[in-house]
Amino acid sequence: MSDATSSSLSAIHVAAFKTSRGWSTDEIAQLQASPHVFTVSCPDGFVMGRVVVDEAELLTIAVAPMAQGRGIGVKLLQDFERTAAERGAARAFLEVAKDNTAALVLYRRADWSICGQRPAYYTRSDGSTCDAILMEKHLT
């Protein structure tokens, strides 16, 4: 996977999350400044995670719209899981919008389990809201 700038990651995130507010260059740079956060990227996507003690959180996974459907998300999710485990995580968590069907399929196929829900968690560009589905996976 390639090294990427906060700016290029932000451009991918904004393009991938058109109905929500994409992350800015500064937001990504601030996250990456933490010793707990890691990023795995390729030219058309990236995954960002955080490991604290033995738990990991998938902060975001984004694939450029033109590259979706090519298995990049599967590879990035595998990279997240492997890197999190290498950093000592035994269990991982994520939040995903209830209406993000493609992501839910990706996570279910990778053996992630639903463990909760946050009502009206995401605010869309049009002002509407969407629930967040909480998922977990044991990495060891």
Image (cartoon, rainbow, N blue to C red):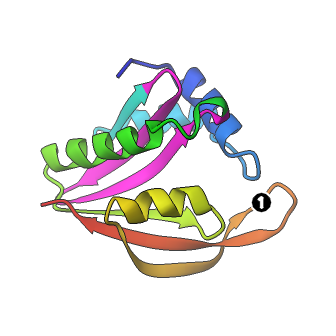
Residue name at image x 72 percent, y 48 percent: 21
Q: Is residue 37 above or below residue 57?
A: above
Residue 47 visible in the current orientation: yes
The image position of residue 140, as x and y in percent, is: 12, 61
Residue name at image x 41 percent, y 28 percent: 41
Query: Magenta stretch mostly in which secondary structure?
Result: strand
Can you tell which quarter of the image residue 98 is in? bottom right
Residue name at image x 68 percent, y 46 percent: 17
Give whichever of 81, 120 is nearer the camera. Answer: 81
The image position of residue 127, as x and y in percent, is: 85, 64
Q: Is residue 121 above or below residue 36?
A: below
Task: Specify whether 63 is left or right of 111.
Answer: right
Q: Is residue 47 above or below residue 120?
A: above
The image position of residue 30, as x and y in percent, is: 48, 36
Q: Which residues are magenta?
A: 42-65
Give SS at disc 1. Answer: loop
Give whichever of 9, 109 is nearer the camera. Answer: 109
Mark 1, Cα crowd under 10 Å, few <14 / some 14-19 / many 20+, is some
Is 44 in the magenta?
A: yes
Q: Quadrant of the N terminus?
A: top left
Residue of label 1: 124
Give whichever of 17, 99 is nearer the camera. Answer: 99
The image position of residue 78, as x and y in percent, is: 30, 45
Task: Specify whether 18 is left or right of 43.
Answer: right
Is 14 in the magenta?
A: no
Residue 25 visible in the current orientation: no
Task: Name the residue furthest right.
Answer: 126
How many tags in the picture?
A: 1
